[in-house]
Image (spheres, rainbow, N blue to C red):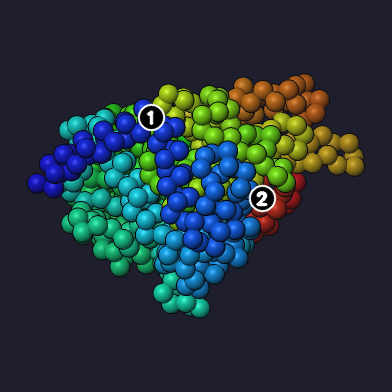
């Protein structure tokens, strides 16, 4: 009965998604002006003269592009219970951002409006898109799992709570969630990640699971443990009616082969979403696609920073109407929680402008350009995934850093530290083809590698099993939405991990 009702509701929702995609600029302009009107009386609204903003040009002129440091003092006051600071009224929930493994955490406001109109609506939109592509879906006839983090109380103001955005969503599920979610919420929000994974695995083997959602890194650990407990060969032996896996947070490319082995079924749905701490931005809209539809009426007004603006002191964003297919941009978002022209730090590549569709290509602070090679995360993810397919290898995690020129005249290059689930039989050949594939994918890297004139062939090192998890633990970033930085233009991350595992530095 619930599944039939969801079919009806999803059809209604699908019409709204299609209408917004067909009228993108009207939809977005209406959203921005609505937020300006609603927040004229706030401290931020008075500071930036919201009362006289009537169009996008004035909006962009009055409000500079923001980063976390510029908003941090105001967000902290909101966490202490102050109202009408960045957003009308008070905000109780704050998403603790773990997009990188830096020591400092970011706390992103999640207002009730943002929770309902952005994060929860995005979740329902994903369901609508899945059912639109697979009308025979029966996800709501069984149970579903969202791999979440945990929540904490903010001690200076107990009315404020913070944690992973996934945990905030779970804590605010609508009543229907009590019927379809497994395991219990108490267990799902357990703070100890290792204890949670073990208890969840044992509880879930008894359920009729239909859908799983979560960051691939942590979902892999859960699924492996389920197979160990049950002694089954693959996950569909445990949950034969499992229909879909929703993933996001990191690129799925390095993990795709592992998940195909977990779920060896031709019509199994792997569905990508872009749900950041700041908002639910996009979702895959076609089965088998490798890009996502930008969600334009879900509480977020979008602008974009061209690549040449990323690292300027004063940055000029462009509106959605000016983006071009095939170019990399950093999203700039204005949300219904008080983030005004804020840069989350991700980078995206537009694949279409009618409708607007994107791929997440990396982070503005995760790239390597030590020798002019301009390598981004999307390049290394793709090269590694293709090389793993060639050698029937499986990867758990990886990170890459530059090897700089030395005084002896040795050329620079890249060092890859890779933790394999299944190692290649011939590591030297794997190293050769990983470098060759990266050259084919990135022409700047190929130019610098030509005849070894500027860069040596990349150097592959294998990390022991569990090395990246131990490093995340040491950084206080284990579990939930925590992710290993894929690329860095420095050697801090890779040297720390190698030091922990007893490997000599490059």
For the point 31% across and 65% down, the residue is: 187
The quadrant where residue 379 appears: top right
In this picture, is 85 found above or below 225? Answer: below
The quadrant where residue 185 appears: bottom left
Mark 2 vs mark 1, CA separation in Å? 46 Å
Image location of residue 456, percent across then percent down? 76, 31
Q: Nearer the viewer, mark 2 or mark 1?
A: 1
In this picture, is 381 found above or below 490? Answer: above
Residue 423 appears in the rendering: no
Please, which residue is most extreme toward the front here? 52
Residue 359 appears in the rendering: yes
Going from N to C along the chain, the mark reached first, 2 or 1, is 1
In this picture, is 486 found above or below 186? Answer: above
Tell me: 284 left or right of 399: left
Tell me: 425 left or right of 400: left
Tell me: 202 left or right of 66: left
Between 265 and 63, the one lying in front of the other is 63
For the point 52% across and 39% down, the residue is: 55
Between 46 and 73, the one lying in front of the other is 46
Q: Residues within 10 Å of mark 1 (few under 14, many from 20)?
A: few
For the point 21% across and 35% down, the residue is: 11
| Label 1 SS | loop
In this picture, is 387 found above or below 499? Answer: above
For the point 56% across and 44% down, the residue is: 59
Image location of residue 88, percent across then percent down? 44, 61
| Label 2 SS | helix
Q: Which mark is residue 353?
A: none
Labels 2 and 1 touching (C-beta < 8 A): no
Image location of residue 164, percent across then percent down? 44, 59
Q: Which residue is mark 1?
A: 23
Q: Which residue is mark 2?
A: 494
Q: Residues within 10 Å of mark 2 (few under 14, many from 20)?
A: many
């Amino acid at each position: 009965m619930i599944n039939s009702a969801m079919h009806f509701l999803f059809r209604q929702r699908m019409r709204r998604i299609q209408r917004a995609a067909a009228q993108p600029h009207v939809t977005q302009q209406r959203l921005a002006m609505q937020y300006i009107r609603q927040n004229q009386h706030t401290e931020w609204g008075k500071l930036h003269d919201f009362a006289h903003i009537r169009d996008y040009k004035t909006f962009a002129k009055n409000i500079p592009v923001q980063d976390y440091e510029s908003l941090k003092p105001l967000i902290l006051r909101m966490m202490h219970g102050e109202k009408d600071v960045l957003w009308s009224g008070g905000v109780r929930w704050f998403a603790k951002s773990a997009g990188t493994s830096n020591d400092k955490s970011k706390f992103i406001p999640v207002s009730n409006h943002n929770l309902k109109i952005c994060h929860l609506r995005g979740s329902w939109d994903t369901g609508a898109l899945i059912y639109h592509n697979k009308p025979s879906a029966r996800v709501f006839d069984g149970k579903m799992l969202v791999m979440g983090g945990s929540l904490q109380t903010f001690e200076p103001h107990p009315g404020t709570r913070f944690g992973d955005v996934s945990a905030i969503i779970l804590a605010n599920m609508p009543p229907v969630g009590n019927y379809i979610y497994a395991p219990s919420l108490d267990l799902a929000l357990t703070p100890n990640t290792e204890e949670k994974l073990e208890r969840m695995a044992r509880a879930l083997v008894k359920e009729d699971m239909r859908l799983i959602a979560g960051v691939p890194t942590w979902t892999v650990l859960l699924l492996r443990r389920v197979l160990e407990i049950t002694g089954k060969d693959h996950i569909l032996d445990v949950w034969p009616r499992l229909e879909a896996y929703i993933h996001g947070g990191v690129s799925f490319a390095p993990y795709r082969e592992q998940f195909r082995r977990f779920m060896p079924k031709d019509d199994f749905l792997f569905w990508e979403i872009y749900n950041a701490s700041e908002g639910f931005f996009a979702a895959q809209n076609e089965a088998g696609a490798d890009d996502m539809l930008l969600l334009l009426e879900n509480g977020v007004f979008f602008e974009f920073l061209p690549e040449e603006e990323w690292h300027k002191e004063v940055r000029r964003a462009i509106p959605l109407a000016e983006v071009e297919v095939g170019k990399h941009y950093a999203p700039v978002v204005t949300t219904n929680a008080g983030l005004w022209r804020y840069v989350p730090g991700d980078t995206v590549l537009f694949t279409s402008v009618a409708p607007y569709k994107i791929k997440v290509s990396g982070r503005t602070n995760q790239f390597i350009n030590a020798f002019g090679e301009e390598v981004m995360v999307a390049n290394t993810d793709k090269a590694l995934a293709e090389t793993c397919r060639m050698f029937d290898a499986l990867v758990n995690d990886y990170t890459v850093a530059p090897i700089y020129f030395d005084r002896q005249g040795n050329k620079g290059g890249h060092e890859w530290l890779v933790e394999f689930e299944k190692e290649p039989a011939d590591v030297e050949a794997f190293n050769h083809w990983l470098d060759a594939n990266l050259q084919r994918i990135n022409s700047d890297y190929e130019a610098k590698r030509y005849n070894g004139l500027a860069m040596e062939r990349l150097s592959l090192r294998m990390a022991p099993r569990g090395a990246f998890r131990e490093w995340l633990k040491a950084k206080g970033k284990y579990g939930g939405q925590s992710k290993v930085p894929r690329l860095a233009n420095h050697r801090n991350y890779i040297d720390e991990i190698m030091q922990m595992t007893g490997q000599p530095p490059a």
